[in-house]
Amino acid sequence: MQSMFCNRCLRHRTCVSQVRVMYSSQSQKVQLMSRLRTQATNTSNVRTQLLSLRMGCQQRRTNPIFLRFSSSSSSSSVSSKVRLTAEMYPGLKRGPYAVLSDADATFFEDLLPGRVITCPSELLGHNTDWMNICRGSSQIMLKPKTTDEVSKILAYCNERRLAVVPQGGNTGLVGGSVPVFDEVILSTALMNNIISLDKNSGVLVCQAGCILETLDNYVAEKDLIMPLDLGAKGSCHIGGNVATNAGGIRLLKYGSLHGSVLGVEAVLADGRVIDCLSSLRKDNTGYDMKQLFIGAEGTLGMITAVSILCPQRPKSVNVAFLGCSSFNQVLETLKKTKTLLGEVLSAYEFLDHECMHLVTKYLGLTNPVGDYPFYVLIETSGSNESHDQEKLNHLLDVVMTDGSVENGTVAMDTTQMQSLWAVRERIAEALQHDGAVYKYDISLPMDAYYKIVEDMRERMKGVAIRVVGYGHVGDGNLHLNVTAPELSIKVLDLIEPYLFEVTEKNRGSISAEHGLGFKKKNFIGYSKKPEVVSLMKDLKKIFDPNGILNPYKTITV
Amino acid sequence: MQSMFCNRCLRHRTCVSQVRVMYSSQSQKVQLMSRLRTQATNTSNVRTQLLSLRMGCQQRRTNPIFLRFSSSSSSSSVSSKVRLTAEMYPGLKRGPYAVLSDADATFFEDLLPGRVITCPSELLGHNTDWMNICRGSSQIMLKPKTTDEVSKILAYCNERRLAVVPQGGNTGLVGGSVPVFDEVILSTALMNNIISLDKNSGVLVCQAGCILETLDNYVAEKDLIMPLDLGAKGSCHIGGNVATNAGGIRLLKYGSLHGSVLGVEAVLADGRVIDCLSSLRKDNTGYDMKQLFIGAEGTLGMITAVSILCPQRPKSVNVAFLGCSSFNQVLETLKKTKTLLGEVLSAYEFLDHECMHLVTKYLGLTNPVGDYPFYVLIETSGSNESHDQEKLNHLLDVVMTDGSVENGTVAMDTTQMQSLWAVRERIAEALQHDGAVYKYDISLPMDAYYKIVEDMRERMKGVAIRVVGYGHVGDGNLHLNVTAPELSIKVLDLIEPYLFEVTEKNRGSISAEHGLGFKKKNFIGYSKKPEVVSLMKDLKKIFDPNGILNPYKTITV
């Protein structure tokens, strides 16, 4: 793990793409855009990255190492070239927190001998987010091993008014897991014990710092599967997954973490341990307090352990790729897919013709089914290979006979499966070759889902190169992307706040998967009503009255 | 609906069974037991009912009408003979709430013309709980149709300090949905509009007063199924289901409501409408506030609308009944069942030989597989009949060949299916013929699950007639019942608090399905740590600072 953090410094990215989040007037906007242009120099590739990064790229279902190092990495200790967040947002004020003193460092060293990091070069990766967009200036990282240590640390920090940022694998996409200023970094890296696995019930109990992939390998030995899967699974910690309510590609089949997480142990700001580490599927004895920590991004408490229900591991996986002539056909096929695949359906993804154009043009991928306005990728996961194949074949017979689908193909082996998945998964990569990319990750009800893409396409006519739509249509999550010749206020003004307003009007979500963190915090009003935000603030005040837990994130009290 | 409430008055039950919940000393206990004996007269059937009712009978998967009228009903307006809760618990003090005035009634009548109930006979059923154990003395029931009306009612009640009890179908088993004193009854009976059903996503949005069965029939037309099923489905309201986090027999397949409820609209005590009525599967924009209302039993807010994800309706259902020679075999078979049935497994229930003895002896049911120490009922629900049958047959081949199961049978038609289910479902009924029944509904981890039954059997030797165990082993929910010749302090003292202590020691739940409500509120400490209870109290103070919402239930602030 440690070497990966150091290696990350090799990656170069200017970190100006989030600047717009905080501007408050048109003049500020223009100034910042001017700065953006200057910083972007003339390299179109850098320009392209700017807005791609602004809304946070999608995590992809590939080796996380690939994700970490997919961009060019030519210089050493490049993380230090990521501008400090505090400099990027000059209007952002540091909260009324204490500054770390020698006495504090001594206290921590006494409590965690040899597990207090103060070396600047070692801290660099932990101060910098996974996207190389946000960088804090923490002077210290603590690596507790036990809940008791976390409790003592937080009680001390609360007493001293030292701000704290909980950090797991630091793979978040909205700047939620790194300091904004000089917060103490509280790492779960050494809290990586698996506590128990009940083979009968499938309930795994483990510390928060266990790496998702490690857990998945562990439960696989008992023919179980973790109910979530992410591109970052080789680095991300289960505590971070739960704290961010991570979605991923298994959500369609296994549901959200609010259903599959059975228990959480968390430490409040004042050091109180909230032990809701139940491993029971049924427990109706009062408010389900663990739910509040799921998705709170560490602002209500530091998750120290998790209990999670692991389903049976599928024995059979199949992938089909289809061409449709309208989005209605995509929806019609989805309906039939749900009916005929039923319990074995594990993914229903779509992309439009513009996406296919991009991956074939820029990445040389082969269109598996020929030219159609829309494409669908269907995956099954089940317990019986011949049954699953028979179900899939029957579905394909039905949808191709009744005209819901124009053409289709089924992978015959793992290589073909990967090729079909690549068409869907490499869209984000292909987009970066097309121009400046304006990325959005929203949830919308089905009746508004693709309409917004068509709407934006009409709206952006003559300004954008293209507007594309793809994503997890099976669970309502749309990736809407606009490419344009350059980063431009004109383009941005055409997109925002219009897109957020349409999302709001349709009761959609402006952050389907990634959370609010630091970067999307100010957009909360588009997805949450004022009464709800007000109630969130009330909760924050109860759980963390001094506001020391992950300040500047999720919610401003 | 209305006629059912009136008819309930025909049912006679003395309502002394919950008295012990509140006693605080041995002398009080003896006095109360003495009263119990007097009230129980000499009718052993009444005696038998007393403790059966004390912990709340299990809801069964049968017509709710049958449940309502299964006991003898010989006199008219019998609900009025149910003792007032306030009289049963003389130590319980009415909170500092206002008393309903004529001006209040006028205000409500102006707001809800023709929808304010003050007729004592009509109120009787709404003052009395489904078990005929608890009875309040509310003078008024309000039947709003809209969220706005609920908001206006609560704002008024909050201002006036009038206590309120939200009421759905009033089918709860822990006295949570009826007044304890004279609280205003706020009924969802007329909030029964279906707002929308998205056929593509399967998301149903409806008002809180929709009856579960009505909703299930409605979504069935679109080949969907409600993700929960209860014996009371013909009466219970979806708002009540969500407020009590109802479990039921589909939980094993579709998970808890914390996963399948996508949105909740609720009104706080001060009338603020908390609109979290999202119909999105993915939305990571801040704290998931709706989760707090799920299972809060109306103490944090009145649920007015719900958005819920409906899975595809299964096309095929199969039932098998097996005999095992040890509980380890039951667990071994469970493991293999999960592996081989995988995604089509919808129920895994068990009963021990004592249960089988009871249903054959008292109800004349046929033992379908011969005498064994343990029995298992397995149900599959899937999208393809031949696949499901093949999977089930394969499982049976495996477990009978490897000796996990001694004998088994598979239902060939619906009648046989019902016969097999009857063996499991009629245990509670059979128990009542065996003596005084001491009923417990707990969750335990698998390694402690049946051990507690053996433990109690040893402990109760020479005192109990028998100790039986049955229940939803697939989701860790155990129904442990003790029968004895009579209601006795000696028996009770052998069971309690020992059973709660063992449950606590094993991190189990003392209320797996039913909630705390009024009757189990004082046992919360066995399943929730003091820090968690303290946090619950803090939340209650934020959501309902004057404590007007469902007072005397769930949590004491």
Image: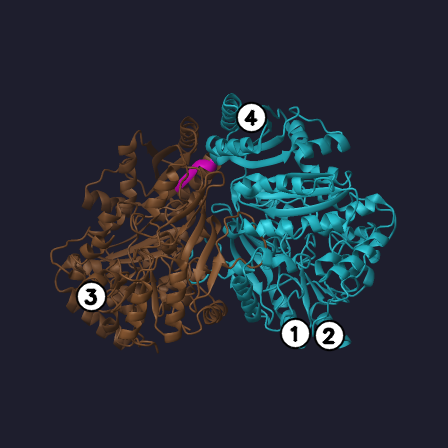
Chain colours: A brown, B cyan
Label 4 to label 1, Cα distance in Å?
62 Å
Q: Is residue A316 above or below residue A175?
A: above
Tag 4: amino acid:
Val
In this rendering, position of residue B29 left or right of residue A211: right
Tag 1: amino acid:
Tyr
Is disc 4 in the same subunit as disc 2?
A: yes
Whether pointer 2 and pointer 1 mark residues with C-beta atoms closer than 8 Å, the reply is yes
Please state the total of marks drawn on the protein image.
Answer: 4
Is disc 4 in the same subunit as disc 1?
A: yes
Q: Residues within 10 Å of mark 1 (few under 14, many from 20)?
A: some
Task: Quickly name the residue at label 2.
Answer: B104
Label 2 to label 1, Cα distance in Å?
9 Å
Task: Quickly name the residue at label 3.
Answer: A120
Task: Quickly name the residue at label 1.
Answer: B156
Chain for disc number 3 = A
Label 4 to label 2, Cα distance in Å?
65 Å
Chain for disc number 4 = B
Q: Which residues are magenta?
A: A342-347
Tag 3: amino acid:
Pro
Q: Which mark is residue B512?
A: none
Q: Which mark is residue B405?
A: 4
Is disc 4 in the same subunit as disc 3?
A: no
